[in-house]
Image: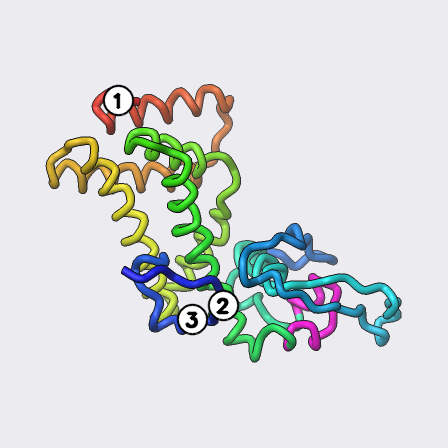
Amino acid sequence: MAAVKEIGMKPSLSKITADKSMSGRGKALRRPPAGRNDGPMNDSVSAKTSETTGRKTAETRQLSRQDWVDHGAWLLGESGPDAVRIERLCSGLNVTKGSFYWHFKSRADFLEQMLAHWQYKETQAIIDEIEAQTSSPVEAVKRLFEKANAGTVNFRAELAVRQWAIQDDKVAQVVRAVDERRLDFLFRQFQAMGFSEADTRMRARLLYSLIFGEALIQQSEPRSQRKARWLASLHYLTNGDV
């Protein structure tokens, strides 16, 4: 299966395949980290602040498509897809619309690229990283579970995308592709451990459900206690190999 391309390639949602794979109305939006270099998104434009609002036009900073998409994903997780609008994006990043239109043709284009990047970043990029860092299926499963519970995965955006998918068929196609890709990765790990096909499918789905459950359930216990439970769960799913 073909890999999903980074958003710099502007893939059509209808062509995204299975492999590549809320309230925020405060006085000011918090901003995600800017300036990260994630492949094709690092092409930058100097974004001047607006004269009409009294900001100093001499003060400029570099905004890349990555910055826009990261901010859009944060806004999506905070307030849902309806909040991801050009005016609000520009306000949150403290720039004019000209900076937005340097990178994106329209709001629809932005949403498409944001969704494609979410699909890549939260699925294929993680799989690639784990495969590069591990040498056994047991190690890969353990590493995935640790990463999912390390606080680096944007589960708010994940939930928002899934809510969005209820209302939008194209988004639903992407979510199905993401689920299929993730489950396929887990299936291959358990298959490599020697389980039967039926057991492999069951264990892959159980672990996938466990990852989401641990992320979404409010936790008040010490992290050490949580980690002990994770390891016990993995010990069970891998027949004692963890």
Marks 3, 2: nearer the viewer = 3
Residue bearing the label numbered 1: 241
> Which mark is first along the chain, 2 or 3?
3
Q: Residue furthest bottom?
A: 105
Tell me if residue 77 is in the magenta stretch. no
Residue bearing the label numbered 3: 11
Q: Which picture quadrant has residue 144? A: top left
Q: Residue at x 75, y 68 (%)?
A: 47
Say what amino acid the circle numbered 3 marks.
Pro
Quadrant holding the C terminus: top left
Q: Residue at x 69, y 75 (%)?
A: 97
Residues in magenta, as a range:
88-101
Q: Which picture quadrant has residue 207? A: top left
**Element at label 2:** helix
Say what amino acid the circle numbered 1 marks.
Asp
> Which mark is first along the chain, 3 or 1?
3
- Assess disc 1: are there few (<14), some (14-19) or many (≥20) residues with their C-alpha within 10 Å of its C-alpha: few
Residue bearing the label numbered 2: 113
Q: On the picture, is 184 further left or further right than 64? A: left
**Element at label 1:** loop
